[in-house]
Image (cartoon, helix red, strand yellow):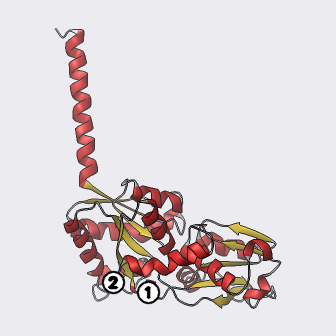
Amino acid sequence: MFTASSRTLRALFTCAVLSLTAAAHAQTVFRVTTIPEEAATEQIRKFTPLAAYLEKELGVKVEFTPVSDYPAAVEALVNKKVDLVWFGGFTFVQANIRSGGKVVPLAQREEDTRFQSVFIAKTDSGIKSLADMKGKQVSFGSQSSTSGHLMPRSFLLAASIEPEKDFRRIAYSGAHDATIASVVSGKVDAAALDITVWKKFVAENKVDTKAVDVFFTTPGYFNYNWSVHADTPAAMQQKIKAALIGLSPANPEHAEILKLNRATRYIETRPENYKGLEAAARSAGLL
């Protein structure tokens, strides 16, 4: 017969085993997330095939889990709750500062070396230039978005347009697809967003360019990347980088993954590529 003392010991032993099992699971699962630039369902559609590919290449179980907002993606990597994050240039800068320089960018799309934002408006709005936005209702994406806020704001300031002073109202949609919807619905007069999301919506006939279209495209800048925490073992960092760079458009399976990621291919990147974004953020008062 078990005594109360022996039952307590058995319970403690069981808890210890469960804790060790959970810890072992956490160590053997490679966790991936991304900034929520589009709806969670779209993020899952885009990145689940990449997670499956990484699982084969890295030899560990890979789980992709979307997060609720841009700051959550930053905190997840800084606090090592995830292992790999798809950051925008600005969220990479924020994460690197927040971690004390302990975030390592591994790879970016070739497109991210010359990324652009677009400003859109209804074609009958009379808005044909940045100056025409004065006195209007304008939407950005997330406040932490590179292509949906930081760089559009930076180019507006360079054109001597101060959003808080010159716009009648500023909105933050939280995601690029929501930004497009805000213009289409008439909630705002004009908006700024990621050029690749705009092109995807146009290609998929999800927006009528006779009704809403681009009136200004920004110059190019560095943007998105895949980043890890600096505490990730060097050998694993190299395996991740090699897997991403190894995606070949000549391989049908790889080509589908690249298409979903709106990439021609992945290339190596460096922290120095994002110094310009950090300077722009400081100049715009966002850091």
Q: Residue at x 33, y 83 (%)?
A: 267
Across and down, in percent, residue 95 comes to 45, 64
Question: Are circles 2 and 1 on residues that touch, CB within 8 Å?
Answer: yes
Across and down, in percent, residue 133 comes to 77, 82
Crowdedness near tag 1: few (<14), some (14–19) or many (≥20) residues, C-alpha within 10 Å: some
Give the alpha-carbon distance from disc 2 to disc 1, as whole Å: 10 Å
Among the two numbered marks 2 and 1 on one chain, the one whose residue lies closer to the N terminus: 1
- Is residue 67 visible from the viewing direction of this image? no
Q: In this view, does 73 lie above or below 274?
A: above
Q: Name the residue under label 1.
A: 113
Crowdedness near tag 2: few (<14), some (14–19) or many (≥20) residues, C-alpha within 10 Å: many
> In this image, 113 relative to 106: left or right?
right
Amino acid of disc 2: Ile
Looking at the image, which is closer to me, 10 or 99? 99
Q: Is mark 2 on a helix, strand or loop?
A: strand
Residue 171 appears in which quarter of the rendering? bottom right
Q: Residue at x 25, y 17 (%)?
A: 8
Residue 202 appears in which quarter of the rendering? bottom right
Q: Name the residue under label 2.
A: 267
Q: What element carries label 1?
A: helix
Q: Residue furthest left?
A: 1
Count the labels in the image. 2
Across and down, in percent, residue 75 comes to 45, 56
Looking at the image, which is closer to me, 132 or 25? 132
The quadrant of the image that shows the N terminus is top left
Across and down, in percent, residue 3 comes to 20, 9
Q: Is residue 197 above or below residue 144?
A: below
The quadrant of the image that shows the C terminus is bottom right
